[in-house]
Image (spheres, rainbow, N blue to C red):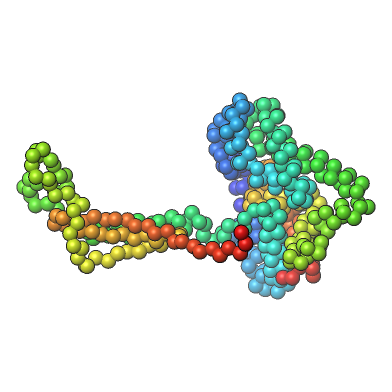
Amino acid sequence: MHAAGRSSISNDMASVTLDVEALRTLVSEAQSGSRLAADRLVREHDGWVRSVIYGVVGQPDLVDDIAQQVWAQVWERLGSLQDPDRLRSWLYSVARNAAIDAGQAHKRRRGAALDTVAEGLNDWRVPTPARLAAGDETHELLLRAIQALPVIYREPFVLRHLEDWTYAEIGALLGLPIETVETRLVRARRLLREMLKDKVES
Amino acid sequence: MTDSHDRLEILISRCLDGEASLQDRRELNSRLRRDSAAEALFEETRALDREIGRALRRAMGRQAARPRTLSLASRVSRYGAIGVAAALALMAWMRPSAPAPGSAVNHHQPQMASWFAPPPTWADTLSDAPSFYERPQVRIGDADRDWIVVPGDRENEFLVVEVKRVHTRAIRLHEDF
């Protein structure tokens, strides 16, 4: 099965949303300033770009801001994309770098303001009384466990669960062999089981 | 972790991700049948996977996962096919008999011979509907579709009227405006 998956990586990736020719045309139109084409690009790719951002930073409340930054950068730099076939990997590198930068900046800010009570209460990870009252304890617990995963495990795990991508599609985006994607997903599940053992009701 | 346990985790992961081959599924089923600990691990992982998937989608403002059993498109096409089949069956049942050989009159193409001729009788002139037909009913989504068959003015002539009734929903508002 994996051998078949490996041989069809490029086809899978191209056919996720648009065929190759349509994608080339769309990128070309967007590069020449078509607002309509740029909007279409955003609509086609915004979902998985957000999943990549979440996979890197691990905090859902940061995703919106970073996604906006990413699309602003894409709009500015789209002219530098030589090969439209590489749009997906190019978008991935833009999103990943933006997410790493934003995550580090957020950590620095949090470190500086950690002494203040207000900042601590605004942190999404702190189970505030309101959230607990709303029955969000399990939800928060699960998100904290996901955040605690190492990035190398969280990235494929989030893409698998949010985008429903195959191992081949995830591997093609992250530049990993299918076996590595599989191993990372197995380890992510093992870590989550260990972290959440006896904490989440079955 | 033993090799056997690692292999079990790989099989479970493949199965949950829809990546398991037929051989993988057979191997996993065989292990689940003879090993209760393996079965417990499978159930635990599956439940955790479902909860985490739900939490992720909720955190990202996504809709719930689509049911993998039957998609909306396939449901619509299925009910659509039923509706089309019902319509075709009805049309076949209602089909007028072939015109008699040598008949010079084309009943389906009314002709205006002269400006001064009396107005012809058009096909949509209705007569009393006999009660020998049944109205098939097909429900698609929020709409009830049925066909009303009305006999035309001429012999063996029927008009089929498709009727779609959209269901209305009453939503109680709790907000005080």
Out of A136 and B71, give the one closest to the viewer.
A136
Q: Residue at x 16, y 44 (%)?
A: B109
Percent coordinates x, y for residue B143 in the rendering: 42, 59
Quadrant (top left, top right, bottom left, bottom right) of the C terminus of chain B: bottom right
Q: Residue furthest right?
A: A115
Q: Say which quadrant the N terminus of chain B sits in.
A: bottom right
Find residue A16 and report its image quarter.
top right
Q: Nearer the viewer, residue A98 or B160?
A: B160
Regarding residue A175, the answer to whether it shows in the image is no
Q: Nearer the viewer, residue A14 or A131?
A: A131
Residue B80 rendering spot, x and y as whole percentages: 40, 56
Residue B153 appears left or right of B43:
left
> Image quadrant of residue A71?
top right
Q: Is residue A196 above or below residue A61?
A: below
Q: Is residue A197 left or right of residue A112?
A: left
Q: Looking at the picture, does residue A147 appear above or below residue B2?
A: above
Q: Which residue appears at 39% of the width and 59% of the height?
A: B165
The residue lying furthest to the front in this view is B177
Q: Give the residue at x 84% y 45%.
A: A106
Residue A15 visible in image? yes
Q: Position of residue B14 (x, y in %)?
A: 66, 57
Quadrant of res B173: bottom right
Describe residue A104's horizontal placement relative to residue B45 as left or right: right
Tally of numbered tags: 0
Say which residue appears at 67% left-offset and 55% top-offset.
B57
Between B47 and A131, the one nearer to me in the picture = A131
In the rendered image, residue A178, in percent from the top left (x then y), is placed at 69, 48
